[in-house]
Amino acid sequence: MKSLLMRSPIAIALFWIGTYLLITVLPLFILLIYPPPGGRRFWVEFSVALGFIGLAMMALQFVITARINRIEASYGVDILLQFHRFTSLTAFLMVLIHPVMLFIVQPETRQLLNFFEAPWRARMAILGTLAFIVMVVTTIWRKPLRIPYEPWRMSHTILSVLAVGLGLGHALGVGNYLSLFWKNMLWTAMALISLWLIIYVRLIKPWMMSKKPYLVEAVTSQRGNVWTLALRPWGHDGFCFHPGQFSWLTLDITPFSMREHPFSMSSNGDHSGRIEFGIKALGDFTRTIKDIPPGTKAYLDGPYGVFTIDRYEDTAGFVLIAGGIGITPMLSMLATAAERKDDRPYLLIYANKTWDSITFREELEALEEKLDLKIVHVLREPPEAWKGEQGYIDKALLARYIPKYKGTRQYFICAAPKMMEQVEQALHNLNVPVTQVHMEHFNLA
Amino acid sequence: MRCNIMLQLVGFIALVLLVTAALFAWLQTRPNSGQNTEWEISQNTLY
């Protein structure tokens, strides 16, 4: 059983989904033990059940987003965040349907919407629902509303605590199902666990990070408007990582500020004494990297991610497909494999705009000498005498290079979201098994 | 494609939760669920 859970992605998925469902519905099953309040109709009980399920789903979001290694190790932060987004919307709908259904089947409950005359339990429900609405709106439309990332993140945490806290206060205040001591304790325990996770993420983890600082050793210019930021541990041994993983980087500010940014490590995973990141100058934060002086303090929360060749020791080889800055985790994989004298074949298909913009071009050429590595450069704007591939990585191009026996390789894709989607679809159309295609989305916000 | 798989997964979870909520409501409102229904109260008052 343990072996199955460690190896089979289907078994792992079933385990986590089963656990999620069990935790979400467990409070309802426990409520069934006791006689229910009398005289209530089916739709009222259904509405109440939706309210409890929505509240449990909301509380579980704190677990999903707490970067707990045991959970993250199964599927990676980007998939967890996607799951978080979709289940949050599901919880939101259930929380909205709960009062709407009550207003329809018990019209007298509509007077509870009169905030100033309603009892406290109803006011908590209104305020909690409003907090949830604001949270959903500011998250889905963050960019059109021009809300900067860091203020959004702070408000997201505050609103989520308000929504869950007020929701629980409402449920306790209504008291139909929560008037017995141990039922109170069950819901209070869930709330306390959620609160503990917030304290852990916001206070304990930053405190642990502050005990293990790093110093900037060098900031080196690379092709393609990319900078390599090299850090060395200060007063501790640093950490080794699986090549392809990423860390959350806090630079020149206290880790309690929560102003952290995820970047893939580009250096050898077996070398803890110097950790390098390839960072493209694209946004407000990344444009400042080039001006960071050596000696600047930094903090790392990591490593995270399942996007690594280390999970596939028994594969015959690898196909790495990168676009632009997506080369960063691939460089780490190749550099680590070269030092380990990995004799398996590696195929790198790397898309860029021009020959001069190919990031880490020289480093990759050097790795061709140390590994069974074939590099296929794909340029959108090739030079005049270019005889290589041009345009975009599509099904036809992939068909020319990926091995005949496609199931013998593991495929890694890291690029802009649109390119990843297209390459994933192309691999699917070429009958590459979906369980052998691995992607890392680096647009987590 | 991955997004489609996630949508299907969450859709399945939502369906299971809706069915569970409906089952809960049915169990709580069926006549012999242990609650004092109006019928039982009326019977008690008669006897």
Image (cartoon, rainbow, N blue to C red):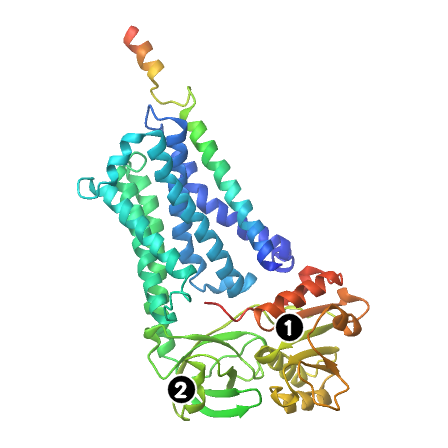
Residue A431 location in percent, x, y? 75, 61
Q: What element carries label 1?
A: helix
Residue A218 location in percent, x, y? 47, 93
Q: Is mark 2 on a helix, strand or loop?
A: loop
| Amino acid at circle 1 | Ile
Label disc, if present, on residue A161 of the rendered structure: none
Label 1 environment density (alpha carbons within 10 Å; few <14, some 14–19, many ≥20):
many
Instruction: Say if A11 sits above or below A147 in the image.
Output: above
A61 with respect to B13 (left or right): left
Read off the chain for label 2: A
Give the residue at the far front of this rendering.
A384
Residue A309 in which image quadrant: bottom right
Instruction: Say if A258 sits above or below B34 in the image.
Output: below
A173 with respect to A349 (left or right): left
Q: How many labels does the image show?
A: 2
In the image, A435 versus A130, the foreground residue is A130
Instruction: Say if A354 sits above or below B41 in the image.
Output: below
Label 2 environment density (alpha carbons within 10 Å; few <14, some 14–19, many ≥20):
few
Q: In which quarter of the image is the C terminus of chain A?
A: bottom left
In the image, A293 versus A335, the foreground residue is A293
Give the residue at the far right of this rendering.
A404
| Amino acid at circle 2 | Gly
Instruction: Quickly name the residue at label 2.
Output: A235
